[in-house]
Image (cartoon, rainbow, N blue to C red):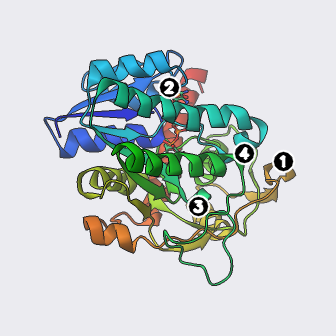
Amino acid sequence: MNRVLITGITGFAGSHLADYVLAEHPGVEVWGTCRWRSRRENVLHLETKIRLLDCDLADPTAVKRALEISRPEAIFHLAAQSFVPTSWTAPAETFHVNVIAQIHLFEAIRALGLDPVVQIACSSEEYGLVLPGETPITEANPLRPLSPYAVSKVAQDFLGYQYFKSYGLRAVRTRGFNHEGPRRGEVFVMSNFARQIAAIEAGFQEPVIRVGNLDSVRDFTDVRDMVRAYWLAAVRGEPGEVYNIASGRGITIRSMLDQLVAMSRTPLRVETDPARLRPSDVEVLLGDASKFRAATGWAPAIELERTMADTIEYWRSHFAARRVLAGV
Ligand code: NDP
């Protein structure tokens, strides 16, 4: 592959994917889409190494133009409204960005006669309600989505399947389980707890961590392992197929919180915040990635402890910079 396009390159996973491609596959041209108002801080260090295209994926003209200019051999389609709680308050916007935008992407590929591999960042949230005896979850598990976000991801997933069957579009669908690490948005659970700890240490927050439901079980993979998996999905995955990408280790949010709190440099207490509880939450998401491992040889390499430590460090740097700005 000589030219790749990453939609959502300014986001959490997109920026790590760009880091990975540039470091591990030198010579590959990396293009990425962003919006004029996108925060660029995740890719500032890559400014001279990547090519950014101004493209709101909700606009079919912009999407076609971005593909016309970049003519990628692989597309990593990561752009999305990616936050489950926002999908409750903005379900139509979530569908527009996640589903309709993907149709724009697919139709532009067809109209321009391109033939890229398209990796679609689908989600473990698609499994939703998981019954006892159904874990670890394989790709054959029923999809019982429990949020507008999850339904939008099911639609992205099935559109990939349908365009492969109908038009031979080389879509490889990945159902990523939770991934975490530095640069993760502050609204996501591990990053949020790590940020609160760093804020408390730096004197920006009283010594109380506010939390939502701590009983859910999640399967965490480091983002750097996840983006390596995305690359392998595009290179070695079978077009038309769907793959779980997961560590296969489930831990409760409570246990993750305990480990993060143990890394805190100052004492603090934990309080439940009713505003952080969702209308319906997925209780257990524990993935079986054996199909993907067999197809690509992928295995996660980074321990959860390092992911958590690196995430806290990321937020410590953030608050250190804020202290400098505030002159304290
Ligand atoms: P982020 O929210 O960090 O990044 C989303 C990116 O999409 C941002 O760059 C954002 O740009 C861009 N974007 C949003 N709307 C548009 C639009 N209309 N046009 C163009 N770009 C847009 O998400 P992640 O990096 O965490 O997730 C990447 C993908 O992986 C998503 O599809 C997500 O659903 C999926 N996923 C993530 C999981 C996780 O645990 N992280 C788990 C499973 C799947 P802007 O800055 O302009 O808003």
Q: With respect to residue 184, does 296 lie above or below?
A: below
Q: CB under 8 Å between callouts 1 and 3?
A: no
Looking at the picture, which amino acid does disc 4 mark? Pro
SS under mark 2: loop
Residue 98 x %, y %: 57, 37
Q: Which sits earlier in the primary sequence, circle 1 or circle 4?
A: 4
In the rendered image, which residue does mark 3 sit on?
Answer: 260
Q: Which sits earlier in the primary sequence, circle 4 or circle 2?
A: 2
Q: Which sits earlier in the primary sequence, circle 2 or circle 1?
A: 2
In the rendered image, which residue does mark 4 sit on?
Answer: 85
In the visual, does 309 lie left or right of 32? right
In the rendered image, which residue does mark 2 sit on?
Answer: 57
Disc 2 residue lies near ligand 1 with CB under 8 A: yes
Residue at left 48%, top 57%?
A: 176
Residue at left 62%, top 45%?
A: 152
Residue 109 x %, y %: 35, 30
Q: How far apart are marks 2 and 1 (CA)?
A: 31 Å
Q: How far apart are marks 4 and 2 (CA)?
A: 21 Å
SS under mark 1: helix
Q: Distance between the residues labelled 4 and 3?
A: 23 Å
